[in-house]
Image (cartoon, rainbow, N blue to C red):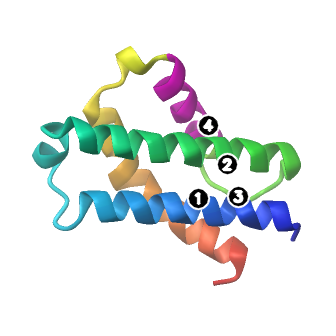
Amino acid sequence: MQREVKKYLFDILSCIDNIETFISSPKIFEDYKNNIMLQHAVERNIEIIGEAVNNLLKMYPEINITNARRMVDARNKIIHGYDGIQPEQIWNIIINHLPSLQIEVQKLLGN
């Protein structure tokens, strides 16, 4: 695996770890919804994840990441359609997509 591919994969894991740290446990939507600084921090990390996935798809189109295109689309929506983002949409990504993304990236890295 190319060094740059590994870098993007590690960036994804780092951002997922950041989000997990920011949200902490137990994950409570109302805490997230009522904290604008937390929302912005999570959104920034999802932007980075989406950019890293986009770069991976350019370099390695056959990479086995479920919903890769949706992660890129989420990044684009946050950046370009920021005024249409709802906390529920980001929460859905946090709860339903990041855990499986983390597992897939760890497998790609051989962890």
The alpha-carbon separation of the residues under discs 3 and 1 comes to 6 Å
Between disc 4 and disc 1, the foreground one is: 1
Q: Nearer the viewer, residue 14 or 105?
A: 14
The alpha-carbon separation of the residues under discs 2 and 3 comes to 5 Å
Task: Check disc 3 and give the amino acid type.
Answer: Tyr
Magenta segment boundaries in residue numbering: 69-80
The alpha-carbon separation of the residues under discs 2 and 4 comes to 9 Å
Q: Nearer the viewer, residue 18 or 76?
A: 18
Mark 4 surroundings within 10 Å by alpha-carbon count, few (fewer than 14), some (14 through 19), many (20 or more)? many
Residue that badge 4 annotates: 72
Question: Of callouts 2 and 3, which one flags the residue occurring earlier in the amino acid sequence?
Answer: 3
Task: Check disc 1 and give the amino acid type.
Answer: Ile
Q: Nearer the viewer, residue 66 or 20?
A: 20
Residues tagged 2 and 3 counted as in contact (Cβ below 8 A): yes
Residue that badge 3 annotates: 8
Residues tagged 1 and 2 counted as in contact (Cβ below 8 A): yes
Residue that badge 1 annotates: 12
What is the x, y in percent for residue 102?
Answer: 52, 66
**In magenta segment, residue 72:** yes
Residue that badge 2 annotates: 52
